[in-house]
Image (tube, rainbow, N blue to C red):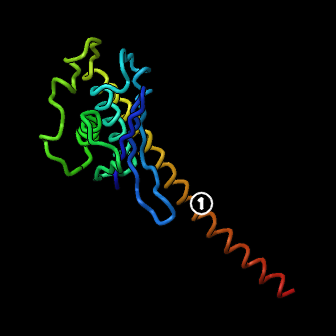
Amino acid sequence: DFVTVKISNENIQVQLHKPELLGDKVIASAHSWFLLKKGWNGSRKSIPAAYLTGYFAGKKALVKGGTDAILYRGTDKYTQRMAAALKGVLDAGLKIPASPEAFPSEERIKGQHLKVKNDVEKVKSTIDSEVKSVWVKHAKDNSAQEENENQEKKKFGFQKLTLRSEEHTSELQ
């Protein structure tokens, strides 16, 4: 799997991709626009915004079964914002080969260098609680779906036997 970080004039998008023969499949995606719903003030392309967007994408990837990835930057320059997004994905729990020296300092990730202050830890905590509730719902949905499939298999098997016995009865008449 691989991670891409795209930085525009106003936003950041972080995606986790799985390479496939017919084209890469996006496993998880996060856009810095979601920060506005969390009460974010200021830039959505700052180092703290990049970190949180990467963190959110990483948590989403974990829910969907992602475990490890590498950074794919294409021809894009490796910047502090890209590094912050990558650190967010790493802090979310995905395994990514990276040197700690490649990341911005904690002060910059928390936005202490910015004029407009945001509570990074509060937003991170909100992401964790949202992802946890999605994870629980996902687990419940999967177990309910498995139960339905088991019931359908039993029912289908019974119907199949019934059809065969009806076919044989019509042949005997």
Q: Kindly tell me whether residue 57 is visible in this rendering.
A: yes
Q: Quadrant of residue 129?
A: top left
- Seen at 29% across and 49% down, the residue is 71
Density class for disc 1 (Cα within 10 Å; few <14, some 14-19, many ≥20) is: few
Check the image and report above or below for 3 versus 173.
Answer: above
Left or right of residue 19, residue 171 in this image: right
Q: Is residue 92 visible?
A: no
Residue 16 at what x, y percent from top left?
A: 38, 48
For residue 159, side relative to residue 65 (left or right): right
Q: Amino acid at mark 1?
A: Glu
| Quarter placement of the C terminus | bottom right
Residue extending furthest toward the left: 101
Q: Furthest-bottom residue in view?
A: 172
Residue on which disc 1 sits: 152
Secondary structure of the residue carrying numbered label 1 = helix
The residue shown at (23%, 50%) is 95
Kindly identify the residue that appears in the image at 25 percent across and 34 percent down. Answer: 84
Tell me: residue 112, above or below residue 3.
above
Spot occupied by residue 88 in the image (x, y as percentages of width and height) = 27, 36
